[in-house]
């Protein structure tokens, strides 16, 4: 199983670092003879970016990203130290910002939230279609 993970301090620069981690995971697949379609790379990096942005923005403290390739999808799991519930807002074309979970739902078909002893974990699966 191909996987990658990293723990971050919860700083704005961590968002770009998490996107790079996702890109590197798919680069490793490509090096192993299974190149990722461009849309899979873009979608994975977008989902990771949205979830880590929420962790950095709404939780004070560290956060982490765990990525696993599971057959036809990449499982993205992001944890943070906030016990604040996650609430997806309904579509609103007039709203500026706060569309992150809406984007994750559109790409992944949904997500799961699990309470942890120190916060929460959000897990989603990004479809990965091999050419």
Image (cartoon, helix red, strand yellow):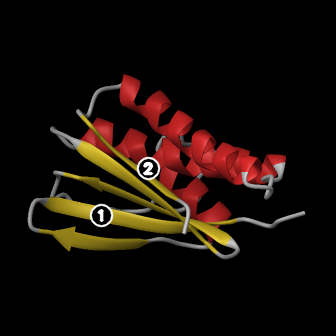
Q: If the image is split into quadrants, where does the C terminus sit? A: bottom right
Is residue 126 something one can see in this rendering?
yes
Question: Can you identify the residue that label 2 sits on?
Answer: 51
Q: Nearer the viewer, residue 26 or 41?
A: 26
Q: If the image is split into quadrants, where does the N terminus sit? A: bottom right
Give the alpha-carbon distance from disc 2 to disc 1, as whole Å.
Answer: 10 Å
Q: Which comes sooner in the sequence, label 2 or label 1?
A: 2
Mark 1: which secondary structure? strand
In this rendering, the answer to whether 8 lies above or below 39 is above
Is residue 96 something one can see in this rendering?
no
In this rendering, the answer to whether 5 lies above or below 121 is above
CB-based contact (under 8 Å), mark 2 and mark 1: no
Label 1, residues with CA under 10 Å away: few <14, some 14-19, many ≥20: many
Q: Residue furthest front?
A: 32
Question: Can you identify the residue that label 1 sits on?
Answer: 121
Q: Nearer the viewer, residue 131 or 12?
A: 131
């Amino acid at each position: 199983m191909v996987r990658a993970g990293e723990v971050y301090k919860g700083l704005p620069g961590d968002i770009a670092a998490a996107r790079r981690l996702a890109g590197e995971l798919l680069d490793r697949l490509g090096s192993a003879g299974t190149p990722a379609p461009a849309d899979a790379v873009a979608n994975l990096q977008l989902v990771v970016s949205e979830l880590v942005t929420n962790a950095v923005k709404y939780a004070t403290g560290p956060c982490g990203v765990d990525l696993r390739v599971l057959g036809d999808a990449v499982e993205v799991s992001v944890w943070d130290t906030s016990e604040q519930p996650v609430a997806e807002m309904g579509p609103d074309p007039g709203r500026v910002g706060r569309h992150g979970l809406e984007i994750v739902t559109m790409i992944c078909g949904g997500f799961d939230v699990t309470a942890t002893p120190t916060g929460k974990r959000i897990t989603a699966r990004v479809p990965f279609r091999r050419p």
